[in-house]
Amino acid sequence: MQEALRGVKPPVSIHVATDGEEALRYLRRQGEFKSFPRPNLIFLDFNLPKASSRDVLREIKRDEDLRVIPVAVFTTSEAERDIRNAYELYANCYLRKPLDLDSFFETIVLAAQFWLDVAYTPTGAKEEAFERPHLL
């Protein structure tokens, strides 16, 4: 994902959470993430270790400060139940991971460009403004 977004203009800062618990600590600015900015967009793998991805999505959308951040669920599943479940948990979009690298890069870039350049969203999840977009 970092490689795919390397050439995006304006440049984006990317933080990769290793699991669901770290993602929630990052989003809530807890512990080592206290001074980190909140992201303008979240790519959520629906197969995270530790805290389940569905629980992470549920927590994001329950939180008044976090719920305005667009969440793009990114997974290999094409199952109707997974798609329905993501939208029932208020995901902003559901993206299937392509199998080939070129299509993977294209999907990431198109989704990032849409959410960062085309769609209007609240800046930085409340009053925060960033010099460069931040992604999780």
Image (cartoon, rainbow, N blue to C red):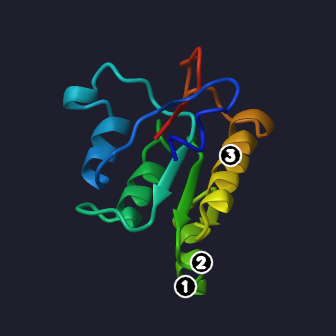
The first of marks 1 and 3 along the sequence is 1
In the picture, residue 97 is in which quadrant?
A: bottom right
Above or below, 133 relative to 136: above
Q: CA distance from mark 1 to mark 3?
A: 26 Å
Residue density around tag 3, few if under 14, some if 14–19, many if 20 or more, within 10 Å: some
Name the residue nearer the viewer: 6 or 16.
Answer: 6
Please report the residue visible at 34 percent of the width from the left and 62 percent of the height from the top.
48
Name the residue nearer the viewer: 101 or 83.
Answer: 101
Furthest-right residue in this view: 118
The label on residue 109 is 3
Q: Are marks 1 and 2 in contact (CB under 8 Å)?
A: yes
Residue 58, image x and y in percent?
42, 59
Q: Which residue is mark 2?
A: 84
Q: CA distance from mark 3 to mark 2?
A: 24 Å
Please report the residue visible at 24 percent of the width from the left and 32 percent of the height from the top.
30
Name the residue nearer the viewer: 82 or 87.
Answer: 82
Q: Which residue is mark 1?
A: 81
Which amino acid does the dot numbered 3 rest on? Val
Mark 2 lies on a secondary structure that is helix
Mark 1 lies on a secondary structure that is helix
Above or below, 101 relative to 1: below
Q: Nearer the viewer, mark 3 or mark 2?
A: 3
In this rendering, would 20 be left or right of 119? left
